Amino acid sequence: MSGDYEAVIGLEVHVELKTKSKVFCPCSTEFGAPPNTHVCPVCLGLPGVLPVLNKQVVELALRAALALNCRVAAFCKFDRKNYYYPDLPKNYQISQYDLPLALDGYLEIDTEYGSKRVGIIRIHMEEDAGKLIHEGEALNPGKYSLVDYNRTGVPLLEIVSQPDMTSPEEARAYLEKLKAVLQYTDVSDCRMEEGSLRCDANVSVRPAGSTELWTKTEVKNMNSFRSVQRALAYEIERQIGLYEGGEQVVQETMAWDEAHGVTVPMRSKEEAHDYRYFPEPDLVPLRIEAEWIGRVKEHLPELPDARKHRLMQDYGLSAYDAGVITASRDLADYFDACVAAYPQAKTVANWLMGDFSRLLNSYNLEPRQAPVSPAELVELMVMIDRGKISGKMGKTVLEEMFATGKKAKDVVAEKGLAQISDAESLRPIIQEVIAANPGPVEDFRQGKEKALGFLVGQVMRATRGQANPALVNELLKESMN
Amino acid sequence: MELYNLPVHELHRLLVERQVSAGELTATFLERIAAVEPAVKAYLTLTREQALAGAGAVDDTTGRGEILAPLAGIPAALKDNLCTRGTRTTCASRILEHYLPPYTATVVERLEQAGMVSLGKTNMDEFAMGSSTENSGFGPTRNPWDPERVPGGSSGGSAAAVAAGEAAYALGSDTGGSIRQPAAFCGVVGLKPTYGLVSRYGLVAFASSLDQIGPLTREVRDCALVLQAIAGHDLRDSTSAHVAVPDYTAALTGEIKGMRLGVPREYFPAGMDPEVKTAVRRAVDKLEELGAILEEVSLPHTEYALPAYYLVAPAEASSNLARYDGVAYGHRAGGADNIIDMYCRTRQEGFGPEVKRRIMLGTYALSAGYHDAYYLKALKVRTLIRRDFEQVFAAYDALVTPTTPTVAFKLGEKVGDPLAMYLSDLFTIPVNMAGLPALSLPCGFSQGLPVGLQVIGRPFAEATVLQIAYAFEQATDYHLARPDLGVRGEK
Ligand SMILES: [Zn+2]
């Protein structure tokens, strides 16, 4: 970004709530079912049906609101948002307009300048729409579209931030942190690829240090955290470019084109809506008793920040290591399970942040889906400590464990990877190496310590890495002196 | 009297005494329908086989010596905006002409449990919007008292069916008077319960905050029996109230001595039919004679009820009717180029003029820039109207008023003048705006046409309303009058 400008970014995030049933009917919310199998008259919006609020939706929404430091409204209501779209069977969406569930919260994010507080304007509950599947390239005559109503009526939370973020990196940090909080509290899976987390951004630029707000655009259609970051970076540069070229930014909605890496204006027809909000007469206003809020607060699980501090305090992890491990509740749970059986926390952290995470990524797995259980990883670390295998060999073993799901000792046994730690087996090999390398042996005897390293390497090569290096060292010295 | 002209409680007695079987009773009603339906046109769909099967099931029950519930084996009609699984439910609209609901409305389920024999679905103003049943997409229903006149609306088919002996009782729905006004025009009893007493699940919504389902019957006792069967909390309707349902027939004592009844002066405006005024005044005298204390009261915001209603009801309707878009069910217009075009053509072809008028009114009232001036203002007026009633109910047990300013008008008379048509609901609309229970029962005649008396009660005081109506009914004989349809076999 040019030094003269700064960005002003606010995010509107929709997350699907992890309830078993939909928000206003008993249909399942399960992802990936055959089209139109999780439907009933209510979520299909058939004539005469009425919505009945699922209490679990409010429970999860309260959890999110409290975890995000919001003030919960004692009295809130639902409203109808009216617009015509074929994936919306009633042609209105039940949402919350002027009296949302929760207001005035914040989220702490880590930035390169330290911790920063991003304000949350409001959190409200609403129902999701269905999914359109278009036949052919566009809605041409002769072509058709199909509607899958499975997702219709799945509960959503809309979380609207203050425009407190000043860079695409901060926006990404906010999303990562929001995801962590919602996963910790079991509110949502936050899987952007399954659509259980969606994000729109409001972005404008202004002269650095200014407090005025310039014209903003809304950016939609971003499908991953990475694409949010890229889209924002592009849009910020585009706006600066316009101002620098003497032009103005037009307030409009832009779609992120992932393939071309650009934002493009959406046709105005798709965004010019007068939603004609009015209170949903089929639902009664929701009164949330202080006792309910108290109960949810009491049962709130440990949140990412608290867990990070606990890891730093109890295990002496660095802020960075603790941050990486607690960014995902899954990984933090995995860490806790490991250290319960194996107290060298730093070693555990190194494995988890290193090879373990690398392998998870390459198999596209969440920590809880790892084919290696915490107990099995601990077994591997213990084998290394006891000299059964070398640390370097340990990495190979872990890869094999991921690939086959086998235990460390079985992998070691089957592949013959056990470390040779018995002197009698090594002596013949050591004699061979000494005989074959008279030069380095002479150098060593002249006091050149470096030559020892070379000879150890030769022994390791001869044993395909299986020899215990410390023992080889000892035996070599013994044989040459 | 012919079987088809008897009240429900009499038919029940005959069934219990085995003087008639449910099968015979049903056959009698089906014959009656065949005889008079060409002149009345109360039904949109007849469910003859279903009725006979239902009656057979009830007769099996009697055969086993089981005690019959009060409505078991009694043939009834359902307004065609109540969803019936597998039986088409049209709301008298072309847009739902062939619509078969996959589920049944709570009230219909409850009546089925009570042993109802369902004869069919009755005509109405399209989506319950109207006061004459002339807005039906399938032709008007005629008033059994005078085929040149309307039966009222929107539950005109239900009221006419009961009045003509085509059903022993019927269900209707009332958003601004749609049960009481046709009950008054057809000389039958019609009750709109307190908002929330009867589940709306399965009632195709017109204006959700005003709609209530209620009975149309020949006598007040029947009304109590049907209400008993349909009232009470329903988990599927979040607006249904958690209130205990009393024994309504226990209130039918005939005794109203010392009861304080208010007569609101705003319900006798200049320009109303003088004979209607006279009939209602005479009814007031009768109630006084029976020992009630009658006093004039004032509901000062009455005149604002109608304009406020025509903002709130269309606003909700514009949203409720948005779902009829041709995408998943109902009529879909052909020849469209794109989705917007398909929506427009479908709705243009599917809806009648009054429905379109109200969708436009409502859309306008909710639009940005007009929302506060119209919709919000109307909600404030609604609060004032509710307060008017609260104030008089602090001192009075109930209110009595005319149900309508006139008797049944001629077909076509008001079709071209929507405002004149809307005025027919002048006295019934405030009750919906305040969510109160109110009943209309026959209290006299004007030009040979029935006049209705409206009794309005406190929230959930249906028992009081029924008590007053019953005392009046038993002290008069207007409920015994039957229209002469000039059909063979008529007495
Ligand atoms: Zn459903």
Image (cartoon, rainbow, N blue to C red):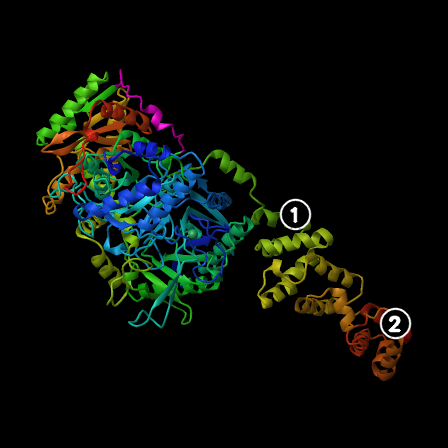
Q: Which residue is mark 1?
A: A313
Q: Height in image: A234 above or below B1?
A: below
Q: Quadrant of the C terminus of chain A?
A: bottom right
Which amino acid type corresponds to the residue marked 2 in the rendered image?
Leu
Q: Secondary structure at mark 1?
A: helix
* In this rendering, position of residue A410 left or right of residue A295: right
Residue numbers of the magenta segment = B242-259
Q: Please say whether residue B350 is one of the residues in the magenta stretch.
A: no
The CA distance from mark 1 to mark 2 is 43 Å
Which residue is depicted at the point 21% across and 59% down?
A: B349
Return the chain for callout 1.
Answer: A
Return the chain for callout 2.
Answer: A
Does any portion of residue A248 appear in the rendered image?
no
Does any portion of residue B120 appear in the rendered image?
yes
Q: Height in image: A127 above or below A409?
A: above
Q: Please say whether residue B245 is one of the residues in the magenta stretch.
A: yes
Mark 1 vs ligand 1: CB below 8 Å: no
- In this rendered view, identify the residue nearer to me: B160 or A119: B160
Q: Quadrant of the N terminus of chain A?
A: bottom left
Q: Secondary structure at mark 2?
A: helix
* In this rendering, position of residue A287 left or right of residue A182: left
**Crowdedness near tag 1: few (<14), some (14–19) or many (≥20) residues, C-alpha within 10 Å:** few
| Residue A18 in picture, x, y percent from top left | 50, 51
Q: Which residue is mark 2?
A: A475
Name the N-terminal-most of marks 1 and 2: 1
Q: How many marks?
A: 2
- In this rendered view, identify the residue nearer to me: A264 or A205: A264
* In this rendering, position of residue B171 left or right of residue A303: left
| Residue B215 in picture, x, y percent from top left | 29, 37
